[in-house]
Amino acid sequence: MTEDEHRIMRFESRWWRLAGSKDTAIRDELDLAPTRYYQRLHQLIARPDVHAAYPVLVNRLRRRTTRRPARPAVGTLNLD
């Protein structure tokens, strides 16, 4: 893993302790756009070497992504 990849994983493990919004903290600390941050984070949690280095965090993030219901497409009505 690169140092940037470690920084992303360390940030994700502690972002909730930071004051303010997560998007602002991503820009300030990592110098990344939030969209790019999440793209990289999702790529990272799919890798076995990242899982070996951060098993608890990766398992939590994997559970979170599989539990979320899909968002309805823009302009559709959910009448259930």
Image: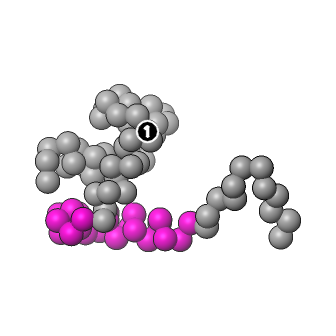
Q: Seen in the image, is 50 located left or right of residue 56?
A: left
Q: Which residue is nearer to you in this view: 77 or 3?
A: 77
Q: At 33% from the left edge and 49% from the top edge, which residue is drawn?
A: 40
| Residue 62 at x, y percent in the picture | 40, 68
Is residue 1 positioned above or below 15 on the image?
below
Is residue 9 positioned above or below 67 on the image?
above
The kind of secondary structure the magenta stretch mainly shows is helix
- The residue indicated by pointer 1 is 34
Q: Which residue is nearer to you in this view: 10 or 46?
A: 46
Which type of secondary structure does the marked residue at label 1 adopt?
helix
Q: Amino acid at mark 1?
A: Pro
Q: Is residue 77 part of the magenta span, yes or no?
A: no
| Residue 68 at x, y percent in the picture | 56, 66
Residue stretch in magenta: 47-68
Q: Quadrant of the C terminus?
A: bottom right
Q: Residue furthest right?
A: 79
Q: Is residue 60 visible?
A: yes
Q: Seen in the image, is 80 located left or right of residue 50?
A: right
Q: At 28% from the left edge and 57% from the top edge, which residue is drawn?
A: 44
| Residue 78 at x, y percent in the picture | 80, 62
Q: At 30% from the left edge and 34% from the top edge, which residue is drawn?
A: 30
